[in-house]
């Protein structure tokens, strides 16, 4: 699990940092004394678990948690605080757990174990980000594609949320104007299947003669959450959808209309 620790007094989280480093399966990706910096980091990097102080200047941990979950809906959030009166606010913000200062080593281990269990229940191995630039993550790690066209083909399939993409549609979208001469699709399909197999995610792609689709039940996705009306996903959408692909612009307009 990739972990960020946020407190305007970083020394108070040093023990958490040490214990995260000692526990298998946890990696401290960042220690922040500024909530805005933590938010910027999470917007472009996979984060599975955030440990947040509640009482911070500029932005409270409660508000930071709301924004972090808008960017990463499956994130586990645990608050630390020296003020028991904040516990109700934390629970109302759907905190996964609250640790009160001063804490003992056993409190930290308990919090980390809870985070591990919660992450395992909440997250699927594969997650796609479609708001902004398109990216794929497997077990929290960014998947890098050797073929840009293979990645674009996957983005097209994901945008259909399980709907089929025919070979004719694929050629028309990925090679506009090529008509029947757009024969690069065979190489692109192979590059995509090879990339998915390499990261252990080949089962998300369903293929039959002249048709491709993704199994929408096999992954998490901000677009899926948006379509399901989840508040965090709706708040996370700011008019940018698969923005590196010109063919996605009409879909962005549709999402704008849905959001109102």
Image (tube, rainbow, N blue to C red):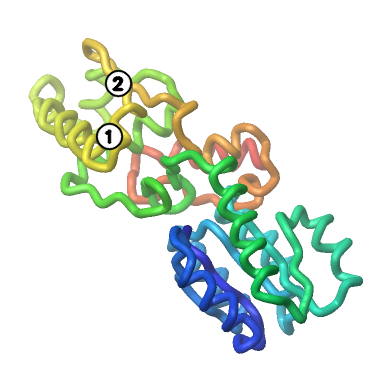
Q: Residues within 10 Å of mark 1 (few under 14, many from 20)?
A: many
Say if mark 1 contacts mark 2, CB within 8 Å. yes
Which residue is located at x 43 percent, y 41 percent? Answer: 125
Q: Is residue 205 above or below residue 37?
A: above
Q: Indicate the position of residue 89 as horizontal and vertical percent values.
A: 85, 63
Residue on which the image places disc 1 = 153
Which residue is denoted by mark 2 in the rendering?
Answer: 212
Residue at (67, 36) in percent of width and height: 229
Residue 100 appearing in the image: yes
Instruction: Answer with the quarter of the image where residue 58 lies.
Output: bottom right
Q: Residue 226: x percent and y percent? A: 60, 39
Label 1 SS: helix
Q: Residue furthest right?
A: 85
Within 10 Å of the Cα at label 2, are there few (<14), some (14-19), or many (20+) other Cα atoms?
A: many
- The CA span between labels 1 and 2 is 10 Å
- The first of marks 1 and 2 along the sequence is 1
**Taking 23 as reference, is 237 left or right?**
right
x%, y% of residue 47? 50, 60
């Amino acid at each position: 699990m990739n972990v960020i620790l946020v407190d305007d007094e970083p020394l108070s989280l040093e023990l958490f940092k040490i214990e995260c480093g000692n526990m298998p399966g946890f990696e401290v990706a960042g220690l922040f004394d500024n909530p805005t910096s933590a938010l910027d980091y999470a917007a472009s990097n996979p984060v599975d678990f955030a440990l947040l102080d509640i009482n911070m200047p500029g932005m409270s941990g409660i508000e930071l948690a709301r924004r972090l979950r808008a960017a990463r809906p499956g994130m586990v959030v645990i608050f630390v605080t020296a003020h028991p009166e904040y516990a109700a606010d934390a629970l109302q913000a759907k905190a996964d757990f609250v640790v009160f200062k001063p804490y003992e080593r056993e409190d930290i281990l308990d919090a980390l174990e809870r985070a591990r269990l919660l992450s395992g229940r909440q997250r699927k191995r594969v997650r796609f980000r479609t708001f902004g630039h398109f990216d794929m993550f497997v077990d929290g790690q960014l998947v890098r594609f050797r073929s840009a066209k293979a990645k674009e083909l996957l983005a097209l399939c994901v945008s259909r949320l399980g709907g089929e993409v025919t070979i004719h549609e694929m050629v028309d979208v990925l090679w506009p104007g090529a008509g029947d001469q757009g024969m690069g699709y065979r190489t692109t399909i192979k590059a995509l299947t090879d990339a998915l197999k390499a990261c252990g995610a080949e089962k998300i792609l369903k293929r039959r003669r002249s048709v491709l689709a993704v199994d929408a039940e096999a992954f998490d996705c901000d677009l899926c959450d948006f379509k399901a009306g989840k508040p965090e996903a709706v708040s996370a959408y700011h008019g940018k959808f698969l923005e590196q692909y010109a063919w996605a612009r009409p879909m962005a307009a549709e999402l704008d209309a849905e959001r109102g």
